[in-house]
């Protein structure tokens, strides 16, 4: 608990000076509750009551377990910037050193919308360290503008030696420059939203005399066979910040019913890599979808969360990501879902997860 208190003690308490429950105690109970599957502030209060004896051994509760209103009030008014900054510092320290692929992508929290504005839920930009399988940051997309959210997120990061990946929305000069300023390189998907760059890339690939090539055969995914072919060439005099290479990736799929489909994608790279290495980079990017976004929605029920007021949705999203990082780094080889259930059923298992975060 001392490590937790020293880390989150820097988050300013938004409440009046005469409050009964300490902010650290509230945050600790909330985190422990989410580790056990809590989805709302009411769940956190119920968890505190059911685990009252265990919690009192870890944090002081001179006035009993905080109520639902206390949890709700704290997360609604807690400074999300300060909370996310502490979370990012914790994540990077927990992972020791971030390396390899860092994927950036946006995600909507579907249930977090203002009354009468269901079409515009909270939109967050998530930063995912693929090799470490950890979330290392999040940023609100201002007015659901994901590009601005990414630029703001990158301004707060140091990613020396990493390769940042992003979809075609972020294949822009300002985003590329921001990535390079973090000390990282980029691998940005290139589509028809940048027609001039795309035509230049295709022409360069067609004119290349001896491109580097790589291929993987018969990758079995969801009962279908897939072959991937990558080509990497030097970019030449292409007008784009820091670009060194152009990559083409073709995926040929044979469905269970025998149908064959082919999909070709293009990328701009600021680091010259082999075609085989590029295939690994491109594949790593999609772990942000199936190892982060999917898990948040299925295991933590993020899309179903109904917190809508003030900073509540943003702060609770940060808390869920903190819990996911801690659960994933626990040495037990069980699935995320099984770990959450075991933490709720077995106090010693919950303590081992909490102790592992020190």
Image: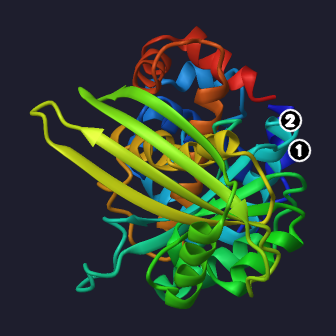
Judging by the rendered image, the residue that carries numbered circle 2 is: 3
Callout 2 touching callout 1 (CB < 8 Å)? yes
**Residue 176, percent from left and from top:** 74, 76
Quadrant where the N terminus sits is top right
The answer to whether 276 appears left or right of 109 in the picture is: right
Residue found at the very far front of the displayed protein: 209
Q: Label 1, secondary structure: give it.
A: helix
Nearer the observer, 1 or 331: 331
Question: Residue drawn at (84%, 71%), measured in percent from left and top?
Answer: 180
User: Secondary structure beneath disc 2?
Assistant: helix
Q: Determine whether 334 is above or below 64 in the image.
A: above
Q: Which residue is mark 1?
A: 6
Quadrant of the image occupied by residue 172: bottom right
Write down the quadrant of residue 53 in the picture.
top right
Few, some or many residues within 10 Å of mark 2 (<14, 14–19, 20+): few
**Position of residue 234 measured from the top left corner of the image (x, y, whole percent):** 76, 65
The colour style of the image is: rainbow
Q: Viewer-proximal residue, 58 or 322?
A: 322
Give 135 or 22, whichever is nearer the viewer.
135
Q: Residue at x 71, y 36 (%)?
A: 132
Is residue 127 in view from this perspective? no
Q: Quadrant of the C terminus?
A: top right
Number of numbered discs overlaid on the protein picture? 2
Residue 153 location (% of width, % of height): 71, 71
Is 199 placed left or right of 128 in the picture?
left
């Amino acid at each position: 608990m001392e490590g937790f208190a020293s880390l989150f003690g820097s988050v300013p308490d938004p409440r009046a000076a005469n409050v009964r429950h300490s902010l650290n105690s509230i945050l600790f109970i909330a985190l422990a509750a989410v580790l056990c599957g809590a989805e709302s502030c009411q769940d956190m209060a119920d968890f505190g009551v059911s685990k009252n004896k265990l919690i009192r051994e870890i944090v002081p509760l001179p006035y009993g377990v905080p109520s639902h209103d206390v949890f709700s009030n704290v997360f609604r008014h807690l400074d999300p910037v300060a909370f996310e900054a502490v979370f990012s510092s914790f994540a990077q320290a927990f992972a020791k050193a971030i390396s390899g692929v860092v994927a950036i992508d946006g995600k909507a929290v579907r249930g977090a919308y203002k009354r009468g504005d269901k079409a515009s839920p909270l939109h967050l930009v998530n930063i995912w360290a693929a090799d470490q399988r950890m979330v290392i940051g999040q940023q609100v997309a201002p007015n659901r503008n994901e590009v601005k959210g990414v630029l703001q997120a990158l301004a707060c990061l140091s990613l020396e030696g990493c390769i940042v990946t992003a979809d075609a929305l972020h294949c822009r000069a300002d985003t590329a420059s921001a990535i390079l300023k973090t000390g990282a390189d980029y691998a940005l998907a290139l589509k028809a939203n940048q027609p001039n760059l795309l035509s230049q890339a295709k022409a360069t690939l067609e004119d290349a005399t001896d491109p580097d090539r790589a291929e993987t055969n018969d990758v079995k995914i969801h009962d279908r066979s897939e072959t991937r072919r990558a080509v990497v060439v030097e970019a030449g005099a292409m007008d784009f910040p820091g670009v060194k290479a152009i990559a083409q990736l073709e995926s040929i799929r044979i469905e269970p019913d025998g149908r064959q489909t082919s999909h070709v994608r293009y990328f701009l790279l600021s680091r010259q890599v082999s075609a085989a290495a590029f295939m690994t980079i491109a594949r790593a990017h999609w772990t942000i979808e199936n190892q982060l976004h999917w898990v948040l929605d299925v295991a933590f029920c993020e899309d179903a969360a109904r917190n809508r007021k003030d900073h509540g949705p943003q702060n609770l999203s940060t808390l869920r990501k903190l819990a996911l990082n801690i659960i994933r780094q626990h040495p037990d080889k069980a699935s995320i879902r099984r770990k959450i259930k075991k933490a709720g059923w077995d106090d010693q298992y919950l303590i081992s997860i909490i102790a592992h975060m020190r």
